[in-house]
Image (cartoon, grey):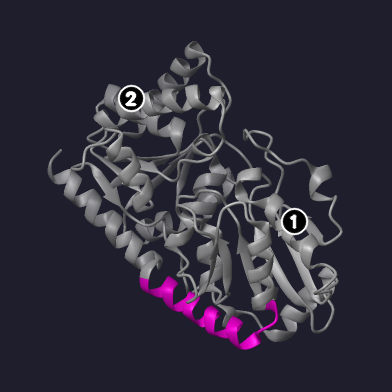
């Protein structure tokens, strides 16, 4: 089976879809990453994945430029001749489904990885764009054989709006994570200590970590506010934020803001997430809305207690009071309280961390997620 994974960012496929792509290669399938060439593009080859590039503008709304993008994708698909095209995120879902229909690809599967900033930000402009996105998605889903949603809230919302039929909607909770890779016992205690020394973390300090893009809708502002609130009362707690500025988003945060709070150490963009998770005692993600946040899966797999929001996608990973705490979106006061509660109770951190690992193994391991995707592929191809 030849499967094309289509995205508008090589980073999107490499950082968030790689586990399923690797597993498909291991099982003998031919996997192609069709995406614009960026810093991750050349890395696919090491995993037995062919990378094919095309050009797209993330911000463009020019119809002539967008039609040209669809043509470029169609031209690639005509040469690749795949059995299945699986698309991810808004533009690739729409353009990929149309392009695949033009060249006669037997099976297209769209993937709604989360509804993102357009379903969070208020205002006339975002309302108009949301209506446009929904109209284009409805068109794309007519061409698709199936539409995968990562959480039941997004699936139900799109079904209620009449954008997808119940027969096409499929719930698969993310792309999975390999718990054998994200396992705390894979790193030695002295290596963790060396990492802490390099970060300036003192003996006995409790490390709170957040990893996300530096945009307002990830709850970065609330995280910074919570850290500020706790700075005086909990001086032994060290707050770290890992994430790059994303000026392509509609709600970006500036580097000046990220450096403005003495209570938070901004580490910028990092690729040593495993090591940073191994240094952490608590993981925080106060996001406003997600698909299934991979950072929470990684943190849970590393047996960390989690504080996140009672928001779409986040509550799929955390059971309140079992492996972490859920707080209301935008509530930095309660966020600070729950961080303080965990920081002050090592036994609770250990119990929640153990429950996090157990939940990831049961619900989000890559083996289970890949099995669901393969069953979907085989089911759809039977009717093509």
**Which residue is rendered at x = 48% and y = 11% of the image?**
64
Contact between labelled residues 1 and 2, with CB atoms less than 8 Å apart: no
Crowding near the residue tagged with mark 1, few <14, some 14–19, many ≥20 C-alpha atoms within 10 Å: many
User: Mark 2 highlights which residue?
Assistant: 98
Q: Is residue 26 left or right of residue 180?
A: left
- Is residue 339 visible to us here? yes
Residue 294 on image: x %, y %: 51, 58
The total number of labels drawn is: 2
Q: Which element is circle 1 on? A: helix
Query: In this picture, is 193 found above or below 255?
Result: below
Stretch of the chain drawn in magenta = 343-362
Q: Is residue 364 left or right of residue 219?
A: left
Rounded to the nearest angstrom, the CA distance separating label 2 from label 1 is 44 Å
Residue 223 on image: x %, y %: 70, 57
**Which residue is rendered at x = 83% and y = 62% of the image?**
263
**Which residue is rendered at x = 69% and y = 78% of the image?**
343
Report the predominant secondary structure element of the magenta stretch.
helix
Residue 351, label in figure: none
Query: In this picture, is 262 found above or below 148?
Result: below
Q: In which quadrant will I find the C terminus? A: top left
- Is residue 56 visible to us here? no
Query: In this picture, is 318 found above or below 52?
Result: below
User: Mark 1 highlights which residue?
Assistant: 225
Q: Nearer the viewer, residue 6 or 360?
A: 360
């Amino acid at each position: 089976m030849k499967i094309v994974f289509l995205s508008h960012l090589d980073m999107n496929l490499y950082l968030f879809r790689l586990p399923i792509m690797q597993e498909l290669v291991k099982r003998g399938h031919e996997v192609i990453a069709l995406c614009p060439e960026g810093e991750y593009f050349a890395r696919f080859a090491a995993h037995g994945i062919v990378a094919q590039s095309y050009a797209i503008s993330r911000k463009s709304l020019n119809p002539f430029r967008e039609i040209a993008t669809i043509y470029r994708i169609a031209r690639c698909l005509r040469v690749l001749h795949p059995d299945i095209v699986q698309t991810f995120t808004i533009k690739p879902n729409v353009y990929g489904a149309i392009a695949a229909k033009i060249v006669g690809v037997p099976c297209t599967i769209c993937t709604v990885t989360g509804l993102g900033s357009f379903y969070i930000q208020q205002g006339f402009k975002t309302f108009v764009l949301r209506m446009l996105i929904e109209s284009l998605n409805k068109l794309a889903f007519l061409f698709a054989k199936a539409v995968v949603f990562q959480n039941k809230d997004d699936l139900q919302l799109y079904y209620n709006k009449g954008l997808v039929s119940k027969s096409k909607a499929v719930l698969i909770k993310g792309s999975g994570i390999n718990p054998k890779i994200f396992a705390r016992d894979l790193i030695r205690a002295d290596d963790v200590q060396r990492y802490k020394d390099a970060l300036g973390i003192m003996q006995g300090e409790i490390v709170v970590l957040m990893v996300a893009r530096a945009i307002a809708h990830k709850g970065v502002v609330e995280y910074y506010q919570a850290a500020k609130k706790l700075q005086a009362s909990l001086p032994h707690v060290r707050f770290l934020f890992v994430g790059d500025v994303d000026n392509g988003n509609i709600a970006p945060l500036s580097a000046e803001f990220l450096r403005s709070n003495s209570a938070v150490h901004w580490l910028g963009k990092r690729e040593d997430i495993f090591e940073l998770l191994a240094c952490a005692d608590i993981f925080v993600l106060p996001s406003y809305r997600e698909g299934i946040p991979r950072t929470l899966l990684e943190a849970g797999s590393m047996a960390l207690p989690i504080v996140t929001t009672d928001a779409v996608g986040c509550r799929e990973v955390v059971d309140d009071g079992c492996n972490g705490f859920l707080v209301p979106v935008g509530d930095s006061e309660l966020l600070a309280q729950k961080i303080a509660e965990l920081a002050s109770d090592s036994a609770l951190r250990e119990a929640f961390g153990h429950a996090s690992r157990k939940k990831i193994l049961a619900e989000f391991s890559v083996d289970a997620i890949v099995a669901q995707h393969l069953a979907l592929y085989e089911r759809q191809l039977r009717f093509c």
